[in-house]
Structures are given as C-alpha cells and as structure tokens.
Image (tube, rainbow, N blue to C red):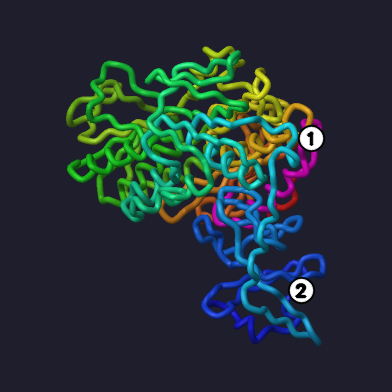
Amino acid sequence: MEGPDLRVGVASGDVPEGSLVQGHVGNEAVLLTRYRGELFAIGAHCPHYGAPLAEGLIVDGTIRCPWHHAAFDLRTGDVLRPPALDGLPCWQVVERQGWVTVTPRRAAPAPAPRRSPPRHPGAPESVVILGGGAAGLYAAETLRHEGYERSITIVESGRQPPYDRPNLSKDYLAGTASEDWLPLRPPGYYADQEIGLRLNAHVTTIDVADRELRFLDGSTQRFGALLIATGAEPVRLGPPPPERHVHYLRTVEDCRAIIAAAEEARGAVVLGASFIGLEVAAALRARDLPVTIVAPDAYPLERVLGPGLGAAIRELHEDHGVTFRLGRMAAEIERDRVVLQDGEALAADLVVAGIGVHPRTDLAWRAGLTIDRGIVVDEYLETNVPGIYAAGDVARWPDLRTGELIRVEHWVVAQRQGQTAARNMLAGPLGPRERFDAVPFFWSRHYDVTIAYTGHAERWDAVEVKGDIRARDCAVAYRAGGRTLAVATIGRDRDSLGVEAFMEGDTTPSAARETTSIR
C-alpha cells in the first residue's frame, strides 16, 4: 500500500484544492482529493486496466483515468464514461481541527426503485441491439442503468459474448494475458440483468415497416427501437493469392488461429503498417518470431500521425527486432514466402494482413438507410428512419468541431456512442435528447510505449511538437487553420486528459481557440 494510512489521517494542509493524495485504508488503496472545498475518498485504481488515478485529472466533479480516459463521479464513484464498466468504491471523510481522516468504506446506497414508463414516457416497447461489441454492450448496460425495465436483446453473429477486443492485438496475442481476461462480463451477468444474448445469429433482413429482424434460420424478432452496431470487417486480399495461411485479426477466433500458427512458424510477414499491423508485429516479437512489415507508405501510420511520429514508431519497432519494407507491396503470397513487387522474396510461413477495414453496412443499405462510407446518423446518432440508431465503427456522424461527417474505428468512441444512443432511445421522439459531442480518443500500445490520441484530424496544415519524440516524451498537435484538431501524446497522460477537457468546451466549427494545456 502506497502513501499514508488514511485511517490515522493527514494534515488538512496536505490536501489542498485539486490535489490527488494516494493512501490506503487497511489493504485497500484510496485516493483522497479536495474539490471545490469538499473532501472525497475513492478507489485509487481504475477498474478498467488498473491505472493509477493519482496520475489522472479532476474535471467538473469527475476523476479522469490517465490511461484510457474513463470518468468517475467523485461523490458517488459511479462510472460516467467508458471504457470502464464499473464504478469506484467510496469512503467517508472527516475533517476536524486541521486533520483529515478516512473512515471504513461507505456502503453504496440502495438504488431507488425505478420504472421505465413514468421515468421515460417515450421509451420504446423493446430494444434490439444488432452487434455485441463495444457499442452494443455499453448501450445495453446504459439502458438498465437508466432504469429501462423492458426487453433488451443483443443479437451477435459471432459465437462469443462481448469481450475485450483491443486486447486481441496486445497482451492476449503476445501471450501475456490468458483468455479468461477477455470476457467483459461473467457468464451469469446477462441473465441477472435480463439482457437477452442471441449468439451465432445471422440477420438477413431489417424490416423497417414491420419493425422486425429476419434471421437465416427463418425466425424473426420484433423491435421497438433498434441500434445497429455491426462494426467493421477486415479488408481482404483478393485472389490470387491463396489465403490458407493469410490471417486477419478481428475476432477471438482469428486471434486463436494466429497464435496457433505462430507456434509452428519460423518467420512472419505483416502486410500493412496500420495500428493493428504494428501491434500484431509487437505481439509476435514478444513470441520471439522474426517479423517483417510490408507497407506502401513511407512511414508507419504516416496518414494518421505524420512523418515525424511515424519515423519514431519505426525506430521503436526496429529496436525490438522488426524489419520494414516500406514504399513497397506484396505481389505474390506463396506457402512459405512473400514476393514483393520488386522481386524480393521474404521467407514467411505466417502472413497477417492489416490493410484496413470497411463498415458492415449491407443490412442497413438493403433496409433503405442512408449510407455514405458508413451509416449516416444525425447528432443524436439516429438514422433517417426514426427509432433506428447506429453506433461504433459502422456509424458516420456530424462532428461538431469540424462540421464534417466522420467515422472513427476505435473502442472508446464506440462505447460512448452506445451510451448516447441508449439515452436517446429512452427519450423517444419528444423527450430531451443528448447530442453526441464526445471528443474521440484512442490508445495504441507498442512494447512498453503507449500512444494516446485525442481529437480527430483527417488532414492538417501544421504540426507542432512539444517535448522530444525520440525520447518518447512528447505531445504532437495537428492543426488546421490555426485550430488544434487532435493531439497525440507519448509519456504525457495528464496532458492528453487536459487536451480532452479543453476540446469538450470547444464544440463549434467556427471556433478558433488554441489548446493551452500542452506543455
């Protein structure tokens, strides 16, 4: 246990306004803080991946996780924003005569009975969620948390209940996390919450007029409101080459297949210097497999992060034994080698393609929903058909900061959209609705280096670097027209949180304010 025993206490002067003091109560780590003159004591570690909240940031009565930007209510410990699924424990705090002590853990108050019809008069008769990924699970949990008591069903084409997909290309693939880390909820959770879970279920038709789904097995399911969260699928190599030893990474089954192949392989080629491609390369290097990355770009992730940070990422991977063939593409994939367009042959009995994804929009298109490189939704995440929403990788929504339609393929964005879509379903056509204005955020880990990216910049006219990229201590701002659209950080988690908090108050395309929270 770090820090002081908070049952014994600390001097009031040791807890100034805005401070984060880590201590313990018995064998539980506790974070003590003062916000607007009031003292709070909450769990010291984020329940998502265990990040130390003492390195986080207090914003508007919340504590923000430094690693993945979850937000928790200081007063109640409730999780207000993903990626965390659960809240924090809380303790009572007493301040007398210049001394602060923390009492045993405060029991969570029993939730008041809530009935959905009076609380949500516009709520639908039932909700069906098409897709059991990040958006789908968080939508279902939000509905229950907000007091919705009618039928909820998650329809998932895969065989697994919702699981931690980001882990597939990281610890699980690297062999440093067991498979029991992957499920987001224990097996009995869905029955306890009365959330129907229909797995290995293949929908053939969304009948908008009759408000029902039709399945490959001939069955149907009616819905009052529908959330389409079908996600995206990997772009696949066309024939030729034969794909019997070309792998893609999207599902846990895909990951198991790569792990099995890696155990027998003598060398691997990764096609594409995308986030997935680079993370796969890092995971395979953790298994001591020789890895070469082949990509047409001049630098890894150049289109997302620019050449400066791209060059540093290349150097990081080279330091760990990865070799690159950039500015080049594969011409042939054979059983034990990859032949490049210039004739060079790379020995490889394992090939992983990470060359992008495309949104799964076929069902929505056949149903008459508006499609434009994704399912087009309004600022409330509703499609052109009332009562049908879309969220996650499949959704393209109006970005309030640029005025453009954007689509973002990242876990936290999908979760936050699922949360907003669920609340808007409960509001119905006449209730107060919630705009989706969350600042996009994602993280990508490469060995012991994590890149955090806040905001969204599809193009920029200026890049400003604070710190030292090569030392892996930097903040890189991407700007257009003098406005900061996105910031990537390495080793500066609190700066990343500060950028997010700034951008939360900067939600109009006409704004031209400058980010001041980057040191």
The magenta stretch spans residue 508: yes
Q: Position of residue 191 (x, y in %)?
A: 47, 46
Foreground: 350 or 202?
202
Q: Please name the amino acid that badge 2 sits on.
A: Pro
Question: Would residue 478 be visible to someone looking at this image?
Answer: no
Indicate left or right for 157 with 365 as reference: left
Q: Residue at x 35, y 38 (%)?
A: 324
Residue at left offset 78%, top offset 44% = 505
- Identify the element where label 1 is drawn: loop
Residue at 44% in and 32% down: 156
Q: Earlier in the sequence, mark 1 or mark 2?
A: 2
- Residue toward you, 204 or 60: 204
Residue kind at label 1, given as amino acid type: Pro
Calculate the distance from the C-alpha at mark 1 to the C-alpha at mark 2: 38 Å
The part of the image, by quadrant, that contains residue 370 is top right
Magenta stretch encompasses residue 165: no
Query: Relative to 30, is 312 above or below?
Result: above
Whether label 1 touches label 2, CB < 8 Å: no
Q: Secondary structure at mark 2?
A: loop
Q: Is residue 423 above or below residue 175?
A: above
The residue indicated by pointer 2 is 16
**Based on the displayed image, in which of its 4 quarters is residue 247 positioned?**
top left
Q: Is residue 17 above or below residue 496?
A: below
Residue 459, horizontal then vertical, whole percent: 62, 29
Q: Which residue is mark 1?
A: 432
Which region shows up in magenta?
Answer: 489-514
Q: Residue at x 74, y 47 (%)?
A: 502
